[in-house]
Image (cartoon, rainbow, N blue to C red):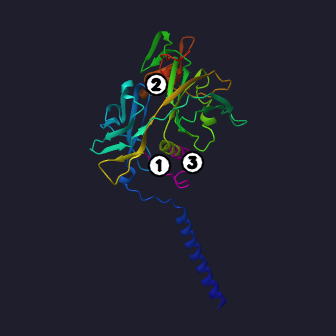
Amino acid sequence: MNKNNNKFGSKYRLLLIALVSMLAYSCVKEIEPDIEIYDTEKYVVSGIFADEVGPQEVVVSLSSGISSPKRIFVEHCNVKVIRSDNSELVYFEQGPGVYVANVDIAFIDKSQSYKVQVKTPQGAIIESSFEGFSSCAEVGDVYWRTQGDEGSSIIGYQFYTDMHASESDSKYYLYKIIETFEHHSPYPLEYWWNGHMNRVEPPDFSKMYCWITRDIYDIFPLSTKDFSENIYNEYQLNYTNNISQRLQHLYSLLIKQYSISELAYDYWAQMRLNLHQSGGMYNTQPVQVKGNLTYTTISDKEVLGYFGVSEVKEKRIFVPPSPFTIIDNSCNIRILRFGYREINWREYPAYIYSELGIPQAKVMDKPCVDCTKMGGVIQKPVFWP
């Protein structure tokens, strides 16, 4: 009797272990959310109409699925900004999904409000709500502090600004930051290979010095809504580290300060939250970002993005070369163990390292002799000292 019970107990335990194993596997298996394609492909419209003369842009794109997020730019739209007195400014397509208008002083009227209208290639019409201008304070002091973990080779500057506004100024702001810096290629162009050796005499030094300008990829919204004064000290802007040549030579930041509406601030604050969330959607639930755009021709579809109206003030600062050790991997030199025949034709023209005018069995990355390969231009900016 005990022997049979032991056999039964053993079989029961084995069955129980199998069931628990199956349950454990089902618990850790990632669940794919049931999201239809038409739920993920939504139009995204973004732009700011500012009180500055010159080119301004509106970007039109489609959101993509969560499994492979990317930006899908939409071509062949009709885009215009409409003033509350029915005056219109037409935007022209400068590149895929990027629509630009050259704004003149006559179209900027701070007693009026503005909205954007986008007609898609399928004929649907998207419009923002009307917004007016709010007063923008001057950009305050911009400064930086050294920041880096003790013992780490990664170190850099954390930038800050102070915002001191009057009570009649807006309590909501958005910062756009554009960096410009020098990038130096260490070698002139002398030898290059395209199946046979070519020599440039004298060596070409023309692409050794470039200036690179690019937007800082981050969102910087600021609010003083609940403050006793319209003042914010030590607002944290971008962090720039010593990986690349950005801090090796002269470095510059252009800080553009936009006065925005409360609704716009809420939108950009939530967008920043989304941008800085970590761990993926299974660890942190993304917030739902509601903008100010809707279809006028379709009632049951959602449009993402925001189109705002803003005064803008700006300030440029220059940062001297830092004392940090620079970690720059833009120029690498590869030894050719089997001679020049080792160079693949896809590398042509392959730049050859030389010593004392004699070519060596070493091939250099393109940025070693051509700084424009890093996205720079050889013409010094007009604002550069």
Across and down, in percent, residue 328 comes to 59, 27
Proximity of marks 2 and 3: CB atoms separated by less than 8 Å: no
Magenta span of residues: 270-291
User: Please, which residue is most extreme toward the bottom here?
Assistant: 1
- Find numbered disc 1 in the image and state the secondary structure of the residue it sits on: loop
Residue 150 versus residue 341 in the image, above or below: below
User: Please, which residue is most extreme toward the top here?
Assistant: 202
Residue at the location (56% across, 66% down)? Answer: 24
Residue beneath disc 1: 289
Residue at the location (41% across, 50% down)? Answer: 65
Tell me, yes or no, whether the highlighted magenta stretch contains residue 187. no
3D distance between C-alphas at marks 3 and 1: 17 Å
Residue 172 versus residue 289 in the image, above or below: above
Please name the amino acid that badge 1 sits on. Val
Across and down, in percent, residue 290 comes to 45, 49
Residue beneath disc 3: 278
